[in-house]
Image: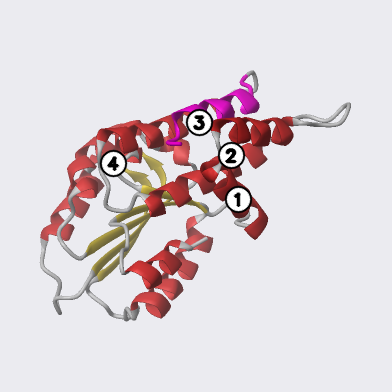
Amino acid sequence: MFDFFEHYKKTGYLHHAHVIVGAYDTVSPALVSALARHLNIETKGNPDLMERFYETLGIDEARELKDAQTRAGFDGARKIFVIGAESFTHQAQNALLKTFEEPTAGTHFFIILPRAEMLLPTLRSRVLVVSGNIANTDDSKELAEKFLDATLEGRFVIAKKMAEKKAGETVDREQFRGMLDHIERILYTRTAGKRDDATANIFREIFQAKTYLSNPGSSPKMLLEHIALVLPN
């Protein structure tokens, strides 16, 4: 779930804003433990580690976060925000756009939400989305890497194979969603620090594809083929 820490150990780069999809009660303890292990952060009585859960993360809560992240850390080290919410209003998301794009130096946000589809495309393009609900198996990650590195024809072949099913079976939409999750995470790692319009557009397209997957009438194969077209060759 937290493979971004492996990237941090190799490169020293940690994205400033993460969204982790999953249940707060499950994800938060595991995340705090990982922060202590990988970043050497004191997790008990640390004024630079803020943990909050909101039924609704609204405009007042967003303003509180904006104000808190501007204040200097007590010991000059990192400031970490672990925030959970059952809902995240559009007004609050818009209020946090600038904060998530250019937070105070040394500040890192980890927002735990039940669904990534709650995010506006504008905010989605500024955060690293990590799925805590889809199994992060080596095989699925390897397939996503193969998809990214393949030619356009090769990507279409992968999409076709994923869509193949026996008589009476239905296409596994969660498999396609997991594939898109892995593609998104790998692409974020590969484009770390690169914030041009073309890159942001790719993440918007992936977000839209995952949104359309929720529609029973959509074609997962066609959605993955569309992503094949917009990805760089």
Amino acid type of the residue that numbered disc 2 sits on in the rendered structure: Arg
Residue 179 position within the rendered picture, expressed as x and y whole percent measured from the top left: 59, 43
Between the C-alphas of marks 3 and 2, the distance is 12 Å
Amino acid type of the residue that numbered disc 3 sits on in the rendered structure: Ile
Range shown magenta: 218-233
10 Å crowding of disc 3: few (<14), some (14-19), many (20+) = many
The residue drawn where x is 51% and y is 45% is: 183
Of label 3 and label 2, which has the lower sequence position?
2
Of label 1 and label 4, which has the lower sequence position?
4
Residue identified by numbered label 4: 58
Determine whether 120 is above or below 63 in the image.
above
Residue identified by numbered label 1: 134
Of label 4 and label 3, which has the lower sequence position?
4
User: Do the numbered discs 1 and 3 sit on residues whose CB atoms are within 8 Å?
Assistant: no
Determine whether 145 is above or below 116 in the image.
below
* Residue 142 can be seen in this image: yes
Amino acid type of the residue that numbered disc 1 sits on in the rendered structure: Ile
For label 2, the SS is helix
Marker disc for residue 177: 2
